[in-house]
Image (cartoon, helix red, strand yellow):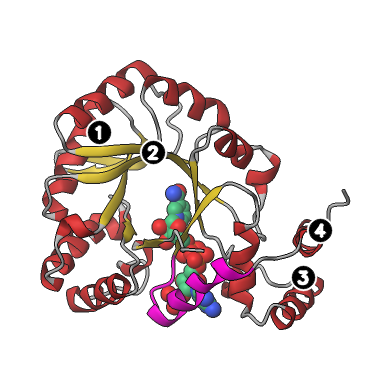
């Protein structure tokens, strides 16, 4: 199966690997050479620095901007031109979205964003105003498509009626499978939308969440059975639901990214998938 993967840049910035422009350019080129052409950004990443880093790095690679897809996010307001909030807030007002998009385009050194996400469900969201703002951005050519992240099923449905959304970017992994139980996955599948999933490995490798010995043992057995690595089994598990699932890989290491893209060829059996879910959630079905 052709891997539909998105490469995250969230770990490239000051709160992650603190990449230089050269390191970022190298990773963009390496992904490009593997035909991994979709990159996901967040405007506030690395204290508002990663978009600019990516824009500079992309220029350095010499890759034509039209040959890659760039998604980025807006809707969280911290501090940016003229604003100095003391706390982070959600803000989906027209003023904030338009200002953010203009800053983003400048940082990325491009005149369009492929997919603009609203990051997080603003409790003060005005669906009418946001729908009009999206229409304006689309007509101006600044944004091609729209998505949301971490929206409830109802909120997705409500905004999707104002302007078609292409996806809801949500957390989903064997370690954090909530999207199964709150029916976010089912809704997107039903609507024939893509489901972009972030943290598909569920922080398994950070050592904080892998204290479940039974799960660790089962993963090791599955890895042997499917001739795969544990990270591939974790990813293959997220790809099993029969929907259009697009994982966002947070790795900054091209060898790991290459390995993970092969997980699309691993078909876990129905029983193995449920076995892992049971062990992870300690649920009985
Ligand atoms: N929309 C939202 O609200 C939201 C929220 C959180 C995250 N996200 C997005 O989702 C992205 C993915 O999150 P994530 O970082 O948790 O992604 P992930 O793909 O689940 O995990 C990747 C992390 O695991 C590490 N890792 C260690 N061993 C690994 C192995 N064997 N194979 C693969 N990775 C291994 C990677 O380090 P190396 O870099 O050293 O490989 C990297 O730090 C974020 O970067 C962000 O863009 C979105």
Looking at this view, name the residue that lies furthest to the top.
128
254 within the magenta span = yes
The reply to whether dot 3 and dot 2 touch (C-beta < 8 Å) is: no
User: Which residue is at 22% across, 31% downward?
Assistant: 138
Q: Residue 266: which quarter of the image?
A: bottom right
Q: Which mark is residue 215?
A: 3
Q: Which mark is residue 282?
A: none
Spot occupied by residue 86 in the image (x, y as percentages of width and height): 31, 42
**Is label 1 or label 4 in front?**
4
What segment carries the magenta color?
A: 250-266
User: Which residue is at 76% across, 58% downward?
Assistant: 277
Position of residue 13 in the picture relative to residue 161 (left or right) = left
User: Which residue is at 49% across, 78% downward?
Assistant: 259
* Residue corresponding to mark 4: 278
Spot occupied by residue 258 in the image (x, y as percentages of width and height): 44, 77
Q: Callout 4 environment at 10 Å: few (<14), some (14 to 19), or many (20+)? A: some
Count numbered badges in the picture: 4
Position of residue 96 in the picture relative to residue 34 (left or right) = left
* Residue corresponding to mark 2: 147
The reply to whether dot 1 and dot 4 touch (C-beta < 8 Å) is: no
* Residue corresponding to mark 1: 97
Q: Does the Cβ of the disc 2 residue fall within 8 Å of ligand 1?
A: no
**Is label 2 or label 1 in front?**
2
Q: Callout 2 environment at 10 Å: few (<14), some (14 to 19), or many (20+)? A: many
């Amino acid at each position: 199966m052709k891997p539909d993967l998105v490469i995250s840049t969230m770990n490239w910035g000051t709160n992650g690997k603190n990449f230089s422009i050269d390191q970022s350019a190298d990773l963009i080129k390496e992904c490009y050479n593997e035909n991994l052409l979709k990159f996901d950004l967040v405007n506030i990443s690395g204290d508002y620095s990663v978009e600019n880093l990516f824009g500079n790095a992309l220029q350095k690679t010499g890759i034509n901007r039209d040959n890659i897809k760039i998604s980025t996010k807006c809707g969280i307001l911290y501090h940016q031109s003229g604003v100095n909030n003391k706390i982070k807030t959600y803000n989906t007002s027209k003023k904030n979205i338009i200002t953010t998009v203009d800053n983003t385009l400048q940082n990325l050194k491009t005149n369009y964003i492929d997919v603009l996400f609203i990051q997080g469900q603003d409790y003060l969201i005005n669906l009418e105003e946001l729908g009009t703002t999206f229409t304006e951005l689309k007509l101006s050519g600044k944004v091609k498509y729209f998505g949301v992240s971490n929206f409830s099923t109802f909120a997705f449905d409500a905004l999707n009626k104002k302007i078609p959304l292409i996806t809801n970017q949500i957390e989903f992994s064997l370690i954090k499978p909530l999207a199964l139980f709150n029916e976010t996955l089912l809704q997107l599948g039903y609507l024939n939308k893509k489901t972009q999933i972030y943290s598909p490995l569920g922080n398994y490798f950070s050592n904080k969440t892998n204290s479940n010995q039974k799960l660790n043992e089962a993963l090791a057995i599955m890895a042997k059975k499917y001739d795969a690595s544990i990270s591939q089994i974790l990813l293959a598990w997220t790809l099993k639901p029969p929907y259009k699932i697009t994982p966002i890989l947070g790795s900054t290491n091209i060898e790991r990214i290459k390995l993970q893209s092969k997980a699309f060829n691993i078909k876990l059996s129905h029983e193995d998938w449920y076995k892992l879910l049971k062990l992870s959630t300690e649920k009985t079905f």
